Image (spheres, grey):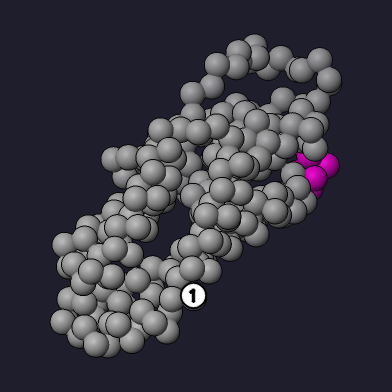
Amino acid sequence: MQETVTALHTHVLVVILFLILFTAKAILLFLNKHKQLEKAKRYTKALDAVFGILILVSGGYLLYLYNGMPGWLITKVILVLLAIPIGIVGLRRHSKLLTILALLIFLYVYGVAETKSLTMQQPGPVRNTTTAPVPGETPETGAPVISDAGAPEEIISSMNEAQLTNAKAIYTQVCATCHGTDGTKGLGGAARLTISNLSLKERINVIENGRGLMPGFNEQLTEQEAEALAAYTMTLKNK
C-alpha cells in the first residue's frame, strides 16, 4: 500500500510540474511573446526531458499496480501519449492551435482520471454477487454478525469492543493515508467514505480483492477483520 501511495504522489507531482511549465510557455505563445518563449524553452529543455521520463516511468509503474485495465484508463494513457508530443510540436512551431489542443486534452484527461469515467461522471457502486447470509445467522467461525443497516451508532453497537478496536487500528494503518482519518480524503481517486453508497458486502469485497489502485488485503486480513473493517468504514458516512 505504501509503495502505491509513494508512486502515486510522485506521478501526480511530476505531472503537475510538467503542466505548470507547459502552461507558462503556452501563455507566452498566446501573448505573442516569441522571444521569451524561445528563451524559456532553452532553459527548461532538460527539465521537460526529465519530467517526461518520470511521467512515463511512474505512470507505467502505477499501471502495473492497477487491478485490471478498464476502458477509461486505456483511453487516458493513449490521450496522454498523444497530448505530450502535440504540445511539444505546438510550442516548437509556435502553433496556437496545436498548443490549445494539447491543453484541452490534458484537462480532459485530468477529469477522466479524477472520476474514472470517460464522461467525467462519478461511477456508481460496485455490483456484488456474494450471497447474503440468512438474517440473524451466525457465521461458521462463530464471530458476531455485523449488520450494515441503520445509523453509524447502530453499526458500532453491533460490533464487540475487540472488533471495533482492531478495526480502528487496521484502518489507521492501511486506509487513512488515502481515505483520511475521517473518511473525507480521496487521494488519487480513493473513495470518500463519508459519501460512499457501497453496502457492507461490497466494502468487504473491495477490501479483500482491491479496486483500481487500491490493492486487495485478503492475504493480510482474516475474513472477520475484513468484515469488521468494512463495518467501521460505514460508521464514517455522513449522517
Q: Secondary structure at mark 1?
A: helix
Of the pair 188 and 50, the residue shown nearer to us: 50
Of the pair 107 and 201, the residue shown nearer to us: 107
Of the pair 113 and 230, the residue shown nearer to us: 113
Q: In screen coordinates, is 95 left or right of 78?
A: left
Which image quadrant is residue 206 in? top right
The answer to whether residue 34 is above or below residue 108 is below
Predominant secondary structure, magenta span: helix
Q: Which residues are magenta?
A: 161-166
Tell me where residue 44 appears, x and y as whole percent: 43, 79
The answer to whether residue 53 is above or below residue 156 is below
Tell me where residue 58 appears, x and y as whole percent: 58, 55
Q: How many marks?
A: 1
Q: In screen coordinates, is 67 left or right of 107?
A: right
| Residue at left offset 58%, top offset 55% | 57
What amino acid is at disc 1?
Leu
Within the magenta stretch, is there residue 92?
no
Within the magenta stretch, is there residue 164?
yes
| Residue at left offset 70%, top offset 49% | 1
Q: In screen coordinates, is 129 left or right of 40?
A: right
Which image quadrant is residue 150 in? top right
Q: Which residue is mark 1?
A: 47
| Residue at left offset 53%, top offset 61% | 53
The answer to whether residue 153 is above or below residue 134 is below
